[in-house]
Amino acid sequence: MLSVLKFAAQSPLVRNRVSLRCFGIFSAFSKANLNLSSSPHSIRIVQYNFFKPRFQSCCKLHTSATSRQSEKGSNQDESLSMNARLKIVAVFLATWCGVYFAAKYSRSRKELEDRDAEMKQVDIGASDYELIDQDGRIRTKKDFLGRWFLLYFGFTHCPDICPEELDKMADIIKTIDSDTSVPDLLPVFVSVDPERDSPAVIKKYVSEFHPNFVGLTGTKDQVKQAAKAFRVYFSAGPRDDDNDYIIDHSIVMYLMSPQGNFVDYYGSRGIPSERIVESIKQNMRNYRRLHG
């Protein structure tokens, strides 16, 4: 009996409580024994009857403490296990996302590099040209390097199409220039009617659309050279009694990069200005990703 109590008292969780309980048991037993006879048989009966309920109480105490300790340890193990799983999942997701976005960025940059290389092979605006601006100064391709510019070929006597396109260009320029996240855009107008469009006529004409417009004209050969560089078609129609005529020409806006390379074109009159603006901004951002 004493060995069992000793065993129960060895538990660190119940040692104090068991010790106090057992001390009380032996104190009570000693008092009870004072009135017993000295018969061994009687002592054994008293021991059994006295210690049985108290021993059961001690065992229940030990069992309850052990159960609580086991449950607490199990909960701690389960919590640690769950935390470990969450950490593994988090690391996996972070690694996967990193690899995915790195691959996506690399693929996107490769596509931009491929397109940039293709555009450099396109010979639109690639060859040099020489024209005269609205102030009488000679302008060549080198004068426009380092700036984004939007270029349009037309003529000042155009009844409707050219004014509509230049109005659209002016709106595009205003919207682009108001956005500080992208570079400013220079509007350029090239006349395909050198016979009637002198620098003075060009200056008055383009000033009605936007103050930043650069108007270009020149001799017939100079205009032909510039039109050929940009693959622009133009042809003068028959003259009427007043010697007036209409010129048929390509209706295209060319977007040129600061390196002087062709980037994009907008040739459909039905395309809204908003879509052209978004396209230009995206081309500018793509260019900045590649060239800084």
Image (cartoon, rainbow, N blue to C red):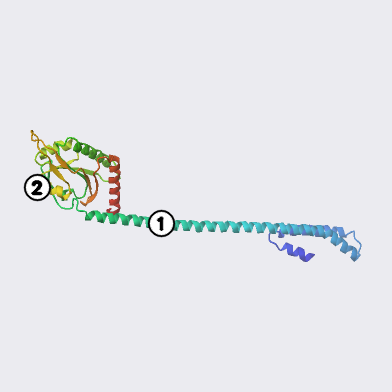
Disc 1 versus disc 2: distance between alpha carbons? 55 Å
In the rendered image, residue 159, in percent from the top left (x then y), is placed at 17, 35
Q: Judge by depth and name the residue closer to the eye, 50 or 70.
A: 70
The quarter in which the N terminus is drawn is: bottom right
Q: Amino acid at mark 2?
A: Asp
Q: Badge 2 is on which residue?
A: 221
Q: Is residue 195 depicted above or below 81 in this figure? A: above
Say which residue appears at 47% left-offset and 58% top-offset. 92
Asked whether the viewer can see residue 23, the reply is no
Residue displayed at 30% across by 47% down: 282
Q: Which one is nearer the viewer's eye here, 81 or 165?
A: 165
Is residue 186 visible in the rendered image? The answer is yes
Q: Position of residue 239 (x, y in %)?
A: 9, 37
Where is mark 1, residue-wise? 100
Q: Which mark is residue 218?
A: none
Query: Residue farthest to the top?
Result: 242
Answer few, some or many: residues within 10 Å of disc 1's Cα (few below 14, many 20 plus, some between 14 and 19).
Answer: few
For the residue marked with disc 1, what is the amino acid? Answer: Tyr
Seen at 39% across and 55% down, the residue is 101
Q: Who comes first in sequence, dot 1 or dot 2? A: 1
